[in-house]
Image (tube, grey):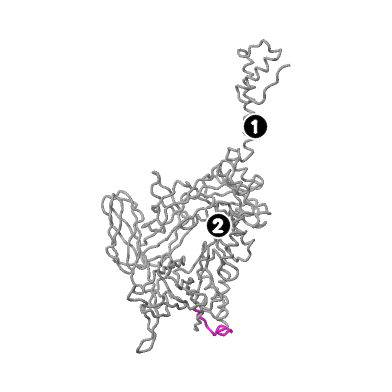
């Protein structure tokens, strides 16, 4: 009996040899010349066909499993079953101070439009476009419109419109034609018909548990040819868009990490007819990244699937902590990479209890060991951080006409008090909150027809417990720019604290801001040394003051330093221009003398003649009473070598109060804007009859 074919060897030569051996053993081909006959060609065809089929079936089997798949389309398809969408490319982010010279001091405002282009310095012999992603409006300061810490992103904006035809596209899937999209920048709006002029903004959905049949959401997935697709709901999980709808999509196309480290930019076109600009980089471009690779997808997709009931994202932590420890009123979570400076491998958690403002050490230990660690990823270390509170204090000056109301003054005042407390309780005492002075002021105006107008004055308060035994230093970070005080209206502390003067006598003392009238340019910092300077360039200082001058120093064809030769007077803002010298890209920024203030300790002592209280600066002979400093720009107060022996407070708590420069105040990470309704000084209402 003839041997059977060997079906385990699948390469071409072995297949052909097996076929020859099989046929030679058949009586019909016992004396046949397989090498020279036409049958040799048929054997080649049979071997090729078998080899092709075996290769195809082998690859088909490989592509059927995530671990062995090679093609990106196959890997992406498997990732969908885990609910995983591959990460897109990320656009580098840079920050700049952008000054537009109007050549006039006439008041006004200027809007920098979405999509305005800045050109970067050369990176590997190529410049990149950086653009704004939203309209930004500022008011004029002196002659200039100054956009401070303006965010610009590398790439170019693309806009597309699609018409939904139900018959040909029943799944409502729309393919975005560009590959290197930063999906975090996608904006989707829908018009229900071509005749409808009203557009509805749809938001990206990431959690099916948070939506219903009326939710105006869209979904995103990676489709064929590495292109992303958006699609809409089915009237169960999200709203289905009507037949004939016009879908508009806008997004940023980016080069990913190629533009990282760009740190010098120039404006490319006029704005509102103005063409004189100064651009100073405050943050070099960073954060750009290419789209997720096949290997990265294969690694991450199963991890996301297995993270069910595990803390992987910030929302996972927040939801699980609040679910398992309902004693917390609010929880916020951020990754160590979001810290300044970054701390990788850690996740930070802050929580506010339902009662009071502080989480006890016992609660921290319980939450960390019993709740967070069992649900967190092994390589991530959780850390619970105390909330850094900014307590808000309000002075409301209300002007009213008593003839236009049936309420008496006390009743009207009580209504205003209630309205303020309701607004604060609704909007504050939680993370990522925003206080808007204009909204609260409008609510007060609309409270009663008798109220003609009102003025809101804001104070931010930091509370801390100083060490009453040892001398220590403290940093109070308000997180917003602070207003420089005057002789009659400046920073103050309460309650009084006890300090020993130079004679060892206990004094009931206070912290006080030292009024400063210096408004010149204190120094100039080089932010970009530039290149190819052959001669010394001219330094021009532009601002709302006068008289400031400076000279540049060039070393090795680069801008080495800028020295102030005359600080000038009257400056509240100033920008620096480096002109001439044959070079380019040199840039510098001015530091005003008014940026920093001083703190001192004072107490009141009865005058020996008049017996009236006279302010005395503590330890004047030793250190001129200076105990610390204020950085008005960053909102930080530094108290040095502070050694009180007592604080006139049951909790040993000292409050430091100062006005912010802005009237819209937000919070992030562990900072919280808080309102203490139990503190009678939180709201002061002054009624003024017209």
Q: Quadrant of the N terminus?
A: top right
Q: Is residue 284 above or below residue 603?
A: above
Label 2: element kind: strand
Residue 591 position by quadrant: bottom left
**Along the line of sight, the residue nearer the viewer: 337 or 510:** 510
Q: Which residues are magenta?
A: 397-410
Label of residue 382 in the image: 2
Residue at 61% x, 45% y is 79
Q: Tell me the crowding category of disc 1: few under 14, some 14 to 19, or many 20 or more residues within 10 angstroms, Cα based.
A: few
Residue at 50% x, 45% y is 290
Residue 323 position by quadrant: bottom right
Q: Is residue 199 above or below residue 1?
A: below
Where is mark 1, residue-wise? 57
Residue 80 magenta: no
- Residue 378 percent coordinates (x, y): 57, 51
Label 1: element kind: helix
Q: Which comes before the other along the chain, label 2 or label 1?
A: 1
- Residue 95 percent coordinates (x, y): 43, 56
Q: Residue furthest top?
A: 31
**Along the line of sight, the residue nearer the viewer: 582 or 290:** 290
**Along the line of sight, the residue nearer the viewer: 542 or 339:** 339
Asked whether the beta carbons under mark 2 and mark 1 sit within 8 Å of each other, the answer is: no
Label of residue 285 in the image: none
Residue 400 magenta: yes
């Amino acid at each position: 009996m003839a041997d059977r074919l060997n079906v385990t060897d699948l390469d071409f030569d072995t297949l052909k040899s097996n076929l020859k051996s099989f046929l030679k053993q058949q009586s019909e081909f016992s004396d046949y010349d397989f090498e020279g006959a036409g049958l040799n060609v048929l054997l080649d065809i049979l071997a090729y066909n078998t080899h092709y089929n075996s290769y195809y079936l082998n690859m088909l089997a490989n592509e059927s499993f995530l671990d062995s798949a090679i093609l990106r389309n196959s890997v992406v398809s498997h990732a969908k079953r885990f609910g995983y969408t591959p990460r897109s490319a990320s656009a580098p982010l840079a920050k700049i101070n952008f000054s537009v010279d109007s050549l006039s001091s006439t008041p006004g405002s200027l809007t920098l439009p979405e999509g305005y282009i800045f050109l970067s310095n050369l990176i590997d012999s190529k410049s990149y476009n950086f653009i704004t992603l939203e309209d930004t409006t500022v008011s004029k300061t002196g002659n200039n419109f100054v956009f401070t810490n303006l965010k610009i992103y590398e790439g170019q904006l693309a806009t597309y419109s699609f018409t939904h035809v139900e018959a040909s596209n029943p799944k409502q899937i729309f393919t975005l034609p560009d590959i290197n999209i930063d999906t975090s920048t996608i904006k989707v709006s829908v018009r229900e018909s071509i005749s409808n002029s009203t557009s509805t903004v749809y938001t990206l959905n990431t959690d099916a548990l948070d939506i219903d049949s009326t939710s105006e959401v869209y979904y995103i997935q990676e489709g064929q040819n590495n292109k992303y697709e958006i699609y809409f709901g089915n009237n169960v999980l999200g709203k289905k868009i009507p037949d004939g709808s016009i879908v508009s999509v806008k997004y940023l196309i980016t080069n990913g990490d190629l533009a990282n480290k760009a740190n010098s930019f120039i404006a490319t076109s006029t704005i509102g007819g103005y063409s004189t600009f100064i651009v100073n980089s405050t943050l070099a471009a960073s954060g750009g990244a290419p789209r997720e690779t096949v290997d990265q997808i294969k690694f991450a997709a199963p991890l996301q699937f297995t993270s069910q009931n595990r803390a992987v994202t910030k929302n996972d932590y927040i939801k699980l902590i609040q679910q398992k420890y309902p004693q917390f009123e609010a929880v916020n979570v951020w990754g160590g990479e979001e810290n300044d400076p970054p701390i990788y491998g850690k996740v930070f958690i802050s929580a506010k209890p339902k009662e009071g403002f502080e989480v006890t050490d016992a609660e921290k230990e319980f939450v960390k060991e019993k709740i967070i660690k069992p649900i967190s990823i092994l390589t991530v270390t959780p850390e619970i951080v105390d909330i850094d509170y900014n307590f808000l204090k309000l002075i409301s000056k209300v002007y009213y006409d008593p003839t236009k109301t049936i309420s008496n003054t006390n009743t009207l005042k009580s209504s205003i008090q209630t309205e303020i407390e309701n607004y604060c309780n609704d909007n504050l005492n939680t993370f990522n909150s925003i206080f808007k002075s204009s909204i609260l002021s409008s609510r007060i105006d609309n409270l009663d027809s008798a109220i003609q107008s009102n003025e809101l004055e804001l104070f931010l308060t930091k509370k801390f417990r100083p060490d009453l035994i040892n001398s220590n230093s403290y940093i109070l970070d308000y997180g917003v720019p602070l207003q420089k005080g005057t002789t009659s209206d400046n920073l103050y502390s309460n309650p009084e604290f006890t300090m020993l003067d130079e004679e060892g006598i206990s004094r009931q003392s206070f912290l006080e801001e030292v009024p400063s009238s210096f408004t010149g340019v204190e120094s100039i910092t080089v932010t970009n040394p530039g290149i190819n300077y052959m001669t010394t360039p001219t330094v021009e200082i532009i601002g709302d003051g006068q008289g400031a001058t400076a000279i540049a120093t060039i070393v090795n064809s680069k801008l080495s330093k800028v020295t102030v030769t005359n600080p000038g007077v009257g400056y509240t803002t100033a920008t620096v221009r480096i002109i001439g010298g044959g070079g380019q890209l040199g840039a510098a920024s001015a530091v005003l003398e008014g940026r920093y203030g001083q703190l001192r300790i004072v107490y009141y002592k009865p005058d020996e003649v008049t017996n009236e209280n006279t302010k005395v600066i503590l330890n004047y002979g030793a250190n001129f009473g200076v105990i610390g400093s204020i950085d008005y720009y960053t909102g930080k107060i530094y108290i040095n070598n502070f050694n009180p022996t007592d604080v006139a407070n049951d909790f040993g708590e000292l409050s430091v109060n100062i006005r912010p420069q802005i009237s819209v105040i937000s919070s992030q990470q562990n900072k919280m804007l808080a309102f203490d309704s139990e503190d009678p000084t939180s709201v002061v209402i002054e009624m003024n009859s017209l």
